[in-house]
């Protein structure tokens, strides 16, 4: 059976039958999460401004959509082919830096639990960017993103 284009996200996928119109990842996203896969996460972008939004995982891209209406560019898209690395970090890594920057007393007073994902991606000019996203369910997000990246790499080769 030849590949089809997903009507939801535009990804080229190999359908299991002729009537199939959307890829597996979008099926998971559109139904009541019965498979255990999660593809939408509430996150906060930690850039020059902290922007609340959603991280959406698709078969060929990762999308951040801002919730705030006043943000001019409400959407960031990272095509999987341009993602170089994805890292998960926890409070222990961050608190050591905080103690170093603020000193032992202030560093321990302002101790918070943070789970973050850093996405290293290359833009169209060849510049590597490192946006950081914070959220409660980042461990699941990194697992899902790794799985999507593996499936994407298998599809290319």
Image (cartoon, rainbow, N blue to C red):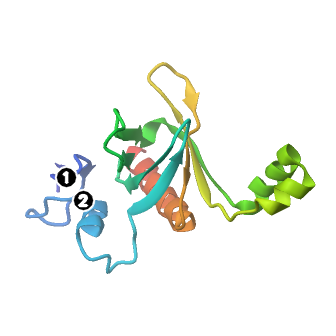
Residue 31 image point, x, y percent = 23, 73
Picture coordinates of residue 126, whole percent (x, y): 52, 22
Q: Nearer the viewer, residue 47 or 125?
A: 47
Residue that carries the numbered disc 1 in the rendered image: 6
Q: Which residue is mark 2?
A: 23
Q: Determine whether label 2 and label 1 are within 8 Å by CB.
A: yes
Q: Position of residue 53 (x, y in %)?
A: 40, 52
Closer to us: 139 or 116: 116
| Residue 22 badge | none
Mark 2 → mark 1, Cα distance in angstroms: 6 Å
Question: Farthest top residue?
Answer: 125
- Quadrant (top left/top right/bottom left/bottom right) for the N terminus: bottom left
Closer to us: 118 or 113? 113
Per the image, label 1 sits on a secondary structure element best described as: loop
Q: Quadrant of residue 47?
A: top right
Horizontally, is 136 left or right of 36 in the view? right
In screen coordinates, is 22 left or right of 44?
left
In this rendering, is residue 122 above or below 67?
Answer: above
Residue occupying the point 20% across, 60% down: 15
Disc 2, SS: loop
Q: Is residue 91 left or right of residue 97?
A: left
Q: At which x and y percent is residue 97?
A: 81, 49
Question: Residue lying farthest bottom?
Answer: 34
Mark 1 crowd level (few <14, some 14–19, many ≥20, 10 Å Cα): some
Residue 61 visible, this orientation: no
């Amino acid at each position: 059976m030849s590949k089809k284009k997903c009507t939801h996200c535009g990804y080229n996928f190999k359908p299991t039958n002729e009537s199939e119109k959307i890829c597996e990842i979008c099926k998971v996203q559109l139904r009541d999460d019965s498979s255990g896969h999660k593809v939408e996460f509430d996150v906060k972008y930690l850039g020059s401004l902290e922007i609340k939004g959603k991280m959406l995982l698709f078969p060929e891209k990762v999308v951040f959509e801002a919730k705030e209406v006043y943000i001019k560019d409400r959407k960031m898209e990272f095509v999987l082919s341009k993602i170089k690395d994805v890292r998960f970090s926890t409070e222990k890594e961050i608190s050591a830096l905080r103690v170093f920057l603020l000193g032992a007393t202030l560093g321990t007073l302002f101790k918070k639990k943070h789970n973050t994902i850093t996405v290293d991606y290359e833009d169209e000019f060849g510049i590597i960017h490192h946006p950081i996203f914070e959220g409660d369910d980042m461990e699941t997000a990194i697992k899902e993103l790794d799985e999507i990246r593996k499936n994407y790499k298998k599809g290319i080769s």
